[in-house]
């Protein structure tokens, strides 16, 4: 039996390793950090446990990526479905993101006026449902070419041809078609898409933008934190006989003449296997490979010279009164320094989650988009000054919104820039969230998990379909199917 080596224990790497091992492929999983989860990992300060990045779950229904994964592994992580999934604070108004489509349409009509809202959201939800149906029926799909998508459009599902057309259209196109001219609504959509597709209403493909805009209707809170489901996946992997090495940083991948790969760690330990799967961003691959593989990914990286990054603030607070949800987006009328979004996302631990905070307390994670160029090449004094400036502006806005619900004292206040993420996750320049979805370059031109080098694969947020835990898990589900087909496993 061929052996597999998976590098990186984020959700993409964990899913790949667990599925391969579960299906009988001897698999070794290597992780540079002390904990699994990657950008969805955690850190602890006394009684508070903080998520380091991603904070929400979706895609848990049986036909969706995480639902499929948990069913195959026979694990049941504990989630709470939230309704409203999120509350948005924009222009002095609270917008409740209800799970029910009808309730959500009524909410939008109250906040943005009735012009086109029903038509807009019914179209968004139809596209979302069609996209999930297509993905659930084609679990071996990857974007090696647009022709692969076309081949999957059989006579029985010609309606899916619309999905291909919608991948070339944008939200802006839909707004124009429906004759919706509403600046506040466009600003609202803009900030939602930055969270889910890392893109804008002018650039994001209607196909994935619809999935991103419908995302909050199925929002789940993971009890114990984002890392908890990851830990359960790891436990299943180990129970099935998989080998896991933490604090093990890979420094070199070498292809031998016998078509095997040798993976060398910082401690000069070597692992051999016919299959290597890297749960790493494309920009990291040239640093640990050589020859034609390094050259290929160097050229590929140059096609994407930059990517999104995040500024994150963590602290603990006292809870003065019950809040209706755990997730909030707070819009700012004034620019937030050194950030390229006009809204920040707030995640609070659930009131019943004693693993993350004591009773009547909560752990808080605030995140906002930023650009790495604003955080590198600075003196220590300049760097700390910028961090303090961003923290102060955001916390002033945060306090004004939550002043009647949360205490003013903040415990274990800390903040992180892209430099922090690079130190913590080793991701190049602290890029998080993957490659933005756009119509130009097209969605299907995103890097593929299947490389030109037999036995060498990628998984994660910089290969199709990109951002978010559901998308990363879907890429792993598809990759495992492809590996079994390419390597002729029974």
Image: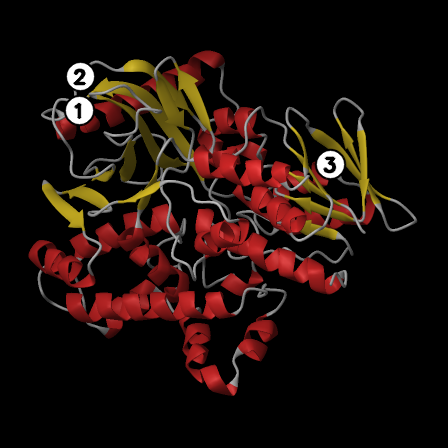
461 sits to left or right of 184: right
Residue 340 location (% of width, % of height)? 35, 39
Tell me where residue 396 appears, x and y as whole percent. 20, 23
Q: CA distance from mark 2 to mark 3?
A: 46 Å
Disc 2 element: loop
Tell me the quadrant of the picture where the C terminus can be found.
bottom right
Residue designated by label 1: 399
For residue 165, what is the image quadrant? bottom left
Nearest-to-viewer mark from 2 and 3: 2
Label 2 or label 3, whichever comes before in sequence order: 3
Tell me the residue that label 2 is attached to.
408
Say which residue appears at 30% left-offset and 58% top-offset: 214
Q: CA distance from mark 3 to mark 1?
A: 44 Å
123 relative position to 462: left or right: left
Side of 273 relative to 60 (left or right): right
Q: Is residue 371 visible?
A: no
Q: Are marks 2 and 1 in contact (CB under 8 Å)?
A: yes
Q: Earlier in the sequence, mark 3 or mark 1?
A: 3
Q: Disc 3 marks which residue? A: 288
Give the secondary structure at mark 3: helix
Residue 88 sits in which quadrant? top left
């Amino acid at each position: 039996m061929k052996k597999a080596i998976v590098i990186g224990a984020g959700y993409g790497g964990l899913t790949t390793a667990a599925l391969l091992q579960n299906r009988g492929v001897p698999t070794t999983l290597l992780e540079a950090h002390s904990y699994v989860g990657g950008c969805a990992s955690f850190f602890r300060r006394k009684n508070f446990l903080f998520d380091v990045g991603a904070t929400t779950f979706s895609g848990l229904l049986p036909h969706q990526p995480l639902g499929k994964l948990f069913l195959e592994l026979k694990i049941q992580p504990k989630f709470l479905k939230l309704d409203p999934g999120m509350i948005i604070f924009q222009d002095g108004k609270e917008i409740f993101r209800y799970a029910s489509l009808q309730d959500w349409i009524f909410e939008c009509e109250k906040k943005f006026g009735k012009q086109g809202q029903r038509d807009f959201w019914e179209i968004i939800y139809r596209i979302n449902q069609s996209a999930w149906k297509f993905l659930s029926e084609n679990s071996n799909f990857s974007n090696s070419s647009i022709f692969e998508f076309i081949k999957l459009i059989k006579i029985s599902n010609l309606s899916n041809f619309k999905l291909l057309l919608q991948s070339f259209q944008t939200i802006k196109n839909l707004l124009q078609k429906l004759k919706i001219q509403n600046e506040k609504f466009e600003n609202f959509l803009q900030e939602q898409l930055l969270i889910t597709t890392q893109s804008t209403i002018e650039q994001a493909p209607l196909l994935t933008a619809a999935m991103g805009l419908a995302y909050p209707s199925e929002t789940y809170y993971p009890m114990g934190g984002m890392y908890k489901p990851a830990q359960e996946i790891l436990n299943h992997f180990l129970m099935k006989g998989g080998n896991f090495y933490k604090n093990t940083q890979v420094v070199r991948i070498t292809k031998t003449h016998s078509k095997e790969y040798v993976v060398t760690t910082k401690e000069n330990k070597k692992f051999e296997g016919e299959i290597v799967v890297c749960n790493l961003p494309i920009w990291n691959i040239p640093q640990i490979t050589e020859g034609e593989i390094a050259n290929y990914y160097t050229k590929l990286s140059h096609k994407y010279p930059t990517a999104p990054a995040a500024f994150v603030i963590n602290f603990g607070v006292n809870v003065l009164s019950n809040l209706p949800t755990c997730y909030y987006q707070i819009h700012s009328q004034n620019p937030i320094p050194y950030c390229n979004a006009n809204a920040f996302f707030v995640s609070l631990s659930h009131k019943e989650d004693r693993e993350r905070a004591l009773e009547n307390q909560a752990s808080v994670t605030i995140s906002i988009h930023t650009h790495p160029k604003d955080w590198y090449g600075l003196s220590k004094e300049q760097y700390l000054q910028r961090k303090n400036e961003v923290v102060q502006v955001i916390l002033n806005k945060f306090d004004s919104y939550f002043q009647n619900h949360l205490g003013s004292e903040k415990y274990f206040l800390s903040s992180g820039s892209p430099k922090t993420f690079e130190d913590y996750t080793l991701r190049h320049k602290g890029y998080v969230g993957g490659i933005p979805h756009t119509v130009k370059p097209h969605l299907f031109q995103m890097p593929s998990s299947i490389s030109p080098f037999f036995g060498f694969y990628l998984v994660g947020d910089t290969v199709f379909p990109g951002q978010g835990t559901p998308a990363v898990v879907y890429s792993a589900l598809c990759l495992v199917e492809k590996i079994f087909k390419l390597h002729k496993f029974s």
